[in-house]
Image: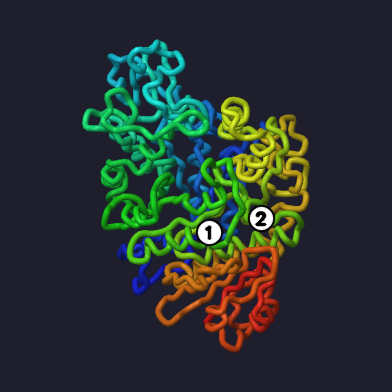
C-alpha cells in the first residue's frame, strides 16, 4: 500500500492542529542509509542505483516516505554528514542523473523522498570554509572563528578560545595556520560549524534548499538543526571565551567542558526555523520537514511543531533513547520499562493539543533495538522482542520511522575488536576515554560500543543468505565497506518476505493499521498502569472507537495490570484481537488467565 491508496484522514479527526490534516499524519517513513542499503556496482558501498532497484520491496512493505541519509559530495569523514558540495552527488553513490531517476521511480510508486540535510556544519573542504580562511574574503564570518586565548601561543595546548570539547573527542577548537585563528566544531574537526548569526549564511542555505525542492524532492530531514543557534553575550562572545559575560560550566572527566548546553535550542532557533519556513516551504504543497533536535524538551517540541508557529512539521527528540546511559553516553545502565514509559509519555502528553511526535527507536545513530532492549540470543526471543518493540512504537500517536532492517529484526553487529569499527565517533571515543583520559577501562568501553555504538546500525542490509547478504554480489572483488553480520544467513528479507508470521509480516500489519485506522493514526493517547515494572499499556481513542495496547517488554511472564484487567472485564473474544506478537488464540488465553507471556503484546478492540 503506497500513499496513492492510503486512506485520507477525515477532517473530523484532529492530528497536529492543522486544517486540513497534513498528508503525513497517517504515513510511515523508512530511513535508508545509502552506504549500507544496496551496492549495485560491486565496489562494496551502497549507491543510488541500488536503492532504485529495491523500490518495489519498499512499496510492498507499505511505507510512504523514504528518508535518505546524505548522498551529497563529501570527503566521508563522518560518512557523508560532512558535506563539501550541497548541489552535487558524491561519486560513491552515483550521479545527479541517478538521483533524478530514483526520484522519478519512487514517485511512480507513490513513494515520497526526503533528503538528509546538514547545515549546522559543512565539511572543511567546502568552498565556503576554504574562502573563510582568508580574513578579507566575504565568507570570513561564515564560521565561528576566534583568536587564541590572550597570553598563549596560537596552536599550542591551552591556547584554545575556551574549554569546550567535541562530541567526537578532543577539543572543539581546531587551529588553522593560514588564518591564524581557531574554528569551532561541535563534531569532527573536519566539520566546522556554520555561523547562522550571519544572515548571508542563512540566505545561501535557503537558496540551496529551494534548488533541491524545485528539483522535485519532497522535503528534508535536517541533521542537528536545533544546534544552529549558539548562546553569546551582548558582544557576541561565547561562554568561557576571554572577556565573555557568560561563565562556562566546569570541565568533565575527559578534560573538557561541553558546548551542548550553549549550542542546543539556542536563543534564536525559533526565529531561524520560522525564517526557513517562509523562505523555503511557504507556498509549496506535499512536502515534509523534520528536524533532528538535540536539546529540545517535549514541551518545546509542542511549540516548534505547532502549525501556528510556522517552524517544522516534526522533530526527533532523544530523551527516550538516553534511558540506558548515565552521565557519559558510554556509561550504560540496564533498560527499565518504567524509564522508557516516562519519557514517551512526556512526549505524547506534550502534543495532545497541538504539534506532532516522531516515533523511533532505531536510526543510523542508534543501535538495533532488538539487541539494545530486547533479546537477540535465539530466534524465538529475537522475533518476539522485535515484534513487541515494533508494536509498542507504532501504536503511539505520531509518525513512525522504520530504520532499514528494523522490519526484519536485524540485530547489533556484535563486533569484538576495535578494528571492526568504522565510525569516527566510536574510534575517537575509545582513544579519548581509554587511552588519553583513562576514565574508562578497555573492557567496559568495548562492551558499551557493542551495545550502543553507531556501527551496529550500519552493517549491510540483509537481503538474502548469500556470502554478502545480497548487499553486494557474492563474487564481488571488493568486500563491503563494513562487515556483514554473520546472522544474515537466518535473518534476511528473502527468508521473511512471504512469511506472514515473520517480523517483516508483522511490520506490514503495523503499517496497514496506521494507514486504515484514524484511531491508530490520530486518536487520543492515554496511559494506563503507569508504575508497572514489566507491562507498558495505553489506550487510543477516536470518537466512539477505543483500542487497548498492552505489551510485556520483558523476557519473563507478567501479570496483567489491575487497571488493564478492569477494562477487559470477563476477557476478550478472538474478534477483538487486532494484532498479537504471538497469535490471536494465544492472546485470548493470556487475557483470560490475566498473565502475558514473555514479550507478549496485544492490540485489543474495546
Task: Let me know if residue 409 appears in the view.
Answer: yes
Question: Which image quarter: residue 441?
Answer: top right
Q: Badge 2 local density, few (<14 within 10 Å), some, or many (20+)?
A: many
Q: Residue at x 47, y 25 (%)?
A: 171
Q: Position of residue 229 (x, y in %)?
A: 32, 38
The residue where tag 2 is placed is 408
365 relative position to 18: left or right: right
Quadrant into which the N terminus falls = bottom right
- Where is 397 relative to 254, above or below? below
Task: Let me know if residue 94 appears in the view.
Answer: no
528 relative position to 309: left or right: right
Is the image coloured rainbow, by chain, by secondary structure, or in one colour? rainbow
Q: Which mark is residue 340?
A: 1
* Disc 2/disc 1 C-alpha distance (Å): 23 Å
146 relative position to 169: left or right: left
Q: Position of residue 474 (x, y in %)?
A: 76, 39
Q: Residue at x 42, y 82 (%)?
A: 544
Amino acid at each position: 500500500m503506497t500513499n496513492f491508496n492510503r486512506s485520507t484522514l477525515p477532517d473530523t479527526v484532529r492530528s497536529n492542529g492543522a486544517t486540513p490534516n497534513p498528508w503525513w499524519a497517517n504515513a510511515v517513513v523508512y530511513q535508508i542509509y545509502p552506504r549500507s542499503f544496496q551496492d549495485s556496482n560491486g565496489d562494496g558501498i551502497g549507491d543510488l542505483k541500488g536503492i532504485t532497484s529495491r523500490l518495489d520491496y519498499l512499496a510492498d512493505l507499505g511505507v510512504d516516505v523514504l528518508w535518505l541519509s546524505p548522498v551529497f559530495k563529501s570527503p566521508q569523514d563522518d560518512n557523508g554528514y560532512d558535506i563539501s558540495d550541497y548541489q552535487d552527488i558524491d561519486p560513491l553513490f552515483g550521479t545527479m542523473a541517478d538521483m533524478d531517476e530514483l526520484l522519478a521511480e519512487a514517485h511512480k510508486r507513490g513513494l515520497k523522498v526526503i533528503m538528509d540535510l546538514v547545515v549546522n556544519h559543512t565539511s572543511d573542504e567546502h568552498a565556503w570554509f576554504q574562502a573563510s580562511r582568508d580574513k578579507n574574503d566575504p565568507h570570513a564570518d561564515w564560521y565561528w572563528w576566534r583568536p587564541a586565548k590572550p597570553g598563549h601561543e596560537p596552536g599550542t595546548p591551552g591556547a584554545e578560545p575556551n574549554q569546550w570539547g567535541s562530541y567526537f573527542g578532543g577539543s572543539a577548537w581546531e587551529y588553522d595556520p593560514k588564518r591564524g585563528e581557531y574554528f569551532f566544531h561541535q563534531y569532527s574537526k573536519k566539520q566546522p560549524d556554520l555561523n547562522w548569526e550571519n544572515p548571508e549564511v542563512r540566505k545561501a542555505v535557503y537558496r540551496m534548499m529551494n534548488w533541491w525542492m524545485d528539483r522535485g524532492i519532497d522535503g528534508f530531514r535536517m541533521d542537528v538543526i536545533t544546534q544552529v543557534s549558539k548562546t553569546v553575550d551582548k558582544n557576541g562572545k561565547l561562554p568561557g571565551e576571554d572577556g565573555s559575560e557568560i561563565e562556562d560550566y566546569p570541565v568533565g572527566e575527559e578534560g573538557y567542558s561541553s558546548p551542548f548546553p550553549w549550542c542546543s535550542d539556542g536563543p534564536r532557533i525559533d526565529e531561524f526555523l520560522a525564517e526557513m519556513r517562509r523562505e523555503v516551504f511557504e507556498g509549496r504543497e506535499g512536502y515534509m520537514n523534520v528536524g533532528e533536535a538535540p536539546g529540545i524538551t517535549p514541551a518545546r517540541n509542542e511549540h516548534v511543531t505547532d502549525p501556528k508557529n510556522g517552524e517544522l512539521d516534526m522533530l526527533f527528540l532523544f530523551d527516550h533513547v538516553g534511558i540506558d546511559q548515565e552521565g557519559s553516553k558510554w556509561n550504560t545502565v540496564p533498560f527499565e520499562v518504567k524509564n522508557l514509559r516516562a519519557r514517551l509519555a512526556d512526549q505524547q502528553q506534550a502534543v495532545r493539543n497541538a504539534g506532532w511526535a516522531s516515533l523511533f527507536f532505531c536510526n543510523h545513530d542508534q543501535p538495533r533495538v532488538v539487541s539494545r532492549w530486547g533479546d537477540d540470543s535465539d530466534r524465538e526471543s529475537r522475533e518476539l522482542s522485535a515484534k513487541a518493540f515494533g508494536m509498542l512504537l507504532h501504536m503511539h500517536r505520531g509518525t513512525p520511522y522504520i530504520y532499514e532492517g528494523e522490519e526484519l529484526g536485524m540485530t547489533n553487529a556484535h563486533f569484538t575488536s576495535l578494528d571492526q569499527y568504522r565510525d569516527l565517533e566510536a574510534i575517537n571515543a575509545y582513544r579519548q576515554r581509554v587511552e588519553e583520559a583513562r576514565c574508562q577501562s578497555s573492557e567496559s568501553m568495548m562492551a558499551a560500543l557493542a551495545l550502543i555504538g553507531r556501527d551496529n546500525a550500519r552493517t549491510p542490509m540483509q537481503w538474502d543468505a548469500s556470502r554478502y547478504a545480497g548487499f553486494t554480489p557474492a563474487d564481488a572483488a571488493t568486500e563491503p565497506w563494513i562487515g556483514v553480520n554473520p546472522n544474515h544467513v537466518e535473518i534476511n528479507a528473502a527468508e521473511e518476505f512471504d512469511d506472514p508470521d515473520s517480523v517483516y509480516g508483522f511490520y506490514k500489519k503495523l503499517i496497514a493499521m496506521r494507514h486504515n485506522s484514524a484511531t491508530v493514526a490520530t486518536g487520543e493517547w492515554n496511559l494506563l498502569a503507569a508504575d508497572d515494572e514489566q507491562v507498558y499499556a495505553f489506550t487510543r481513542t477516536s470518537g466512539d472507537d477505543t483500542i487497548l495496547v498492552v505489551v510485556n517488554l520483558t523476557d519473563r511472564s507478567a501479570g496483567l495490570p489491575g487497571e488493564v484487567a478492569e477494562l477487559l472485564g470477563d476477557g476478550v473474544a478472538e474478534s477483538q484481537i487486532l494484532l498479537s506478537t504471538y497469535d490471536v488464540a494465544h492472546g485470548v488465553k493470556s487475557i483470560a488467565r490475566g498473565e502475558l507471556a514473555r514479550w507478549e503484546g496485544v492490540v485489543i478492540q474495546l
